Image (cartoon, grey):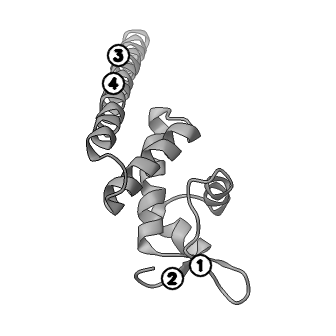
């Protein structure tokens, strides 16, 4: 463990997630607190928050909990130097491609939404 420990409330504030969401991710096996206090409170470190940030960024792109878990495992293995590096990098590249495709799909949706909002504005102007 490196760095100072913080309780779940501070971790939630720092990452921008709710305590309930962090507990859900813990139950799903995506995050494990680095320690527990004498009173049994979850304690997190900055690397734990980095994991939460990865999950937070994957969520709006529609990645499943299993996909999140898989990516975190890949990142852990690359950091630790375990596993076949080339295979890990190939899997990571697959996540990159999927993320790029999902980002483009969101951009397309945003463009349609902006077009619709513009049409509504035009209708308001015409009928005001």
Q: Nearer the viewer, mark 1 or mark 2?
A: 1
Q: Which mark is residue 5?
A: 2
Q: Decide: is 119 above or below 82.
A: above
Please report the residue visible at 48 percent of the width from the left and 43 percent of the height from the top: 70
Crowd class of label 2 (few under 14; some 14 to 19; many from 20; radius 10 Å): many
Q: Decide: is 96 above or below 117.
A: below
Question: Mark 4 or 2 closer to N-term?
Answer: 2
| x then y, percent, for residue 105 | 37, 21
Secondary structure, mark 1, is strand
Measure the alpha-carbon separation of dots 4 and 3: 21 Å
Q: Nearer the viewer, mark 1 or mark 4?
A: 1
| x then y, percent, for residue 123 | 41, 11
Quarter of the image where the C terminus is located: top left
Q: Decide: is 33 above or below 28.
A: below
Measure the alpha-carbon separation of dots 1 and 2: 8 Å
Instruction: Report if the CB atoms under discs 1 and 2 are less than 8 Å apart.
Output: yes
Crowd class of label 4 (few under 14; some 14 to 19; many from 20; radius 10 Å): few
| x then y, percent, for residue 66 | 56, 39
Residue annotated with mark 3 = 115
Secondary structure, mark 2, is loop
Q: Nearer the viewer, residue 89 or 56?
A: 89
Question: Mark 1 or 2 closer to N-term?
Answer: 2
Quarter of the image where the N terminus is located: bottom left
Residue annotated with mark 4 = 101
Instruction: Report if the CB atoms under discs 1 and 4 are less than 8 Å apart.
Output: no
Q: Decide: is 14 above or below 27.
A: below
Crowd class of label 3 (few under 14; some 14 to 19; many from 20; radius 10 Å): few
Residue annotated with mark 1 = 35
| x then y, percent, for residue 87 | 31, 38
Please report the residue visible at 34 percent of the width from the left and 30 percent of the height from the top: 103
Measure the alpha-carbon separation of dots 3 and 1: 50 Å
């Amino acid at each position: 463990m490196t760095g100072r420990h913080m309780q779940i409330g501070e971790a939630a504030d720092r990452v921008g997630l709710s305590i309930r969401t962090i507990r859900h991710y813990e139950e799903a096996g995506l995050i494990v607190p680095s320690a527990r206090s004498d009173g049994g409170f979850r304690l997190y470190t900055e690397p734990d928050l980095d994991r939460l940030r990865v999950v937070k960024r994957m969520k709006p792109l529609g990645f499943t909990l299993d996909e999140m878990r898989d990516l975190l495992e890949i990142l852990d293995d690359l950091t630790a130097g375990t596993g076949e590096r080339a295979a890990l990098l190939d899997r990571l590249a697959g996540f990159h491609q999927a993320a790029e495709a999902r980002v483009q799909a969101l951009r397309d949706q945003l463009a349609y939404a902006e077009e619709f909002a513009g049409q509504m504005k035009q209708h308001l102007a015409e009928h005001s």
